[in-house]
Amino acid sequence: MNTHDMPLVEARDESKVRVLRLGAAPAHPLSRAMIRALHDQIREAATDHHVNAIVLDGPGHIFCAGHDLKEIARHRKDPDQGLDYLRALFTECGAMMLDLALCPKPTIAMVDGIATAGGLQLAASCDLIFASDSASFCLPGVKNGGFCTTPAVAVSRSLSRKQVMEMTLSGDAFDADWALAAGLVNRIYPSERLTAETLEFARTLATRHPKAIADGKQMLYRQLDLPLDQAYAEATEVMIGHFMDPVRIAQENSG
């Protein structure tokens, strides 16, 4: 099959886990078409009752290289030097990243290579990142005359202010050990074990009660920005809802 005929995002299901595999190898760039294809897949998986967890896979030595700079360069020839295109591109990308971050299903980025710029934004927008020991992470905008401003929105939700400043101001690549110690990555595995270990964890997640996961995820993220007393008040109501859930009550009664 010609590479141009291959899907930009390939979806497959394994035991209620939806694996979304990025195409357009080797860089898997976030072209406007890729953003749209990925957004469609994320929205579909979020509402599919047969899917309880999502794994995002950018196979090879580049997880995702971020935005398609060649596509951006082509629009420099537009009468407005690409302004309308850039506004549409980053608006659509932000909407896709937001839906990924707010997805009711647990999401795991499986990173075996480098996740850079918007590619790191994509990984950081997931709930978890499982990486191989050869993975690396980079926000290189300053080296190209810019700044990784929108990628930093996602990354700053995982790192301290000093750490994300170091990434954005240096533009350097950071290895998997640094990312684990910094809290950007959850687990590191040898490259040959990464897929098996990630899918095993995802399949376990997929056995949990979906409504409890969805409600719990939403509350967990929301309460981080609330005053402590309000966080406890709102979390208490969600917690009561967990215990009063008909599925949980039925399980307790059957035991």
Image: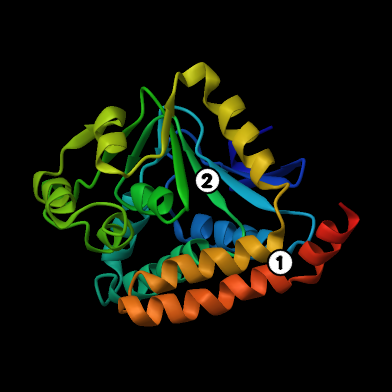
Query: How many numbered marks have been drawn onto this rendered protein structure?
Result: 2
Q: Secondary structure at mark 2?
A: strand
**Percent of width and height locating residue 36:** 55, 63
For the residue marked with disc 1, what is the amino acid?
Thr
On screen, 79 above or below 253? below
**In this picture, residue 136 sits left or right of residue 231:** left
**In this picture, residue 148 sits left or right of residue 105:** left
**Percent of width and height locating residue 185:** 37, 40
On screen, 113 above or below 182? above
The reply to whether residue 7 is in sight is no
The reply to whether residue 137 is in sight is yes
Residue drawn 41% across and 39% down?
186
For the residue marked with disc 2, what is the amino acid?
Ile
Residue drawn 16% across and 48% down?
163
Q: Which mark is residue 47?
A: 1
Residue drawn 16% across and 57% down?
161
In the image, 208 versus 140, the foreground residue is 208
On screen, 171 above or below 195? below
In the image, 6 versus 204, the foreground residue is 204
Q: CA distance from mark 1 to mark 2?
A: 17 Å
Q: Which residue is mark 2?
A: 108
The first of marks 1 and 2 along the sequence is 1
In the image, 36 versus 183, the foreground residue is 183
Q: Secondary structure at mark 1?
A: helix
**In this picture, residue 69 sits left or right of residue 23:** left
Q: Which mark is residue 149?
A: none
**Percent of width and height locating residue 201:** 60, 36
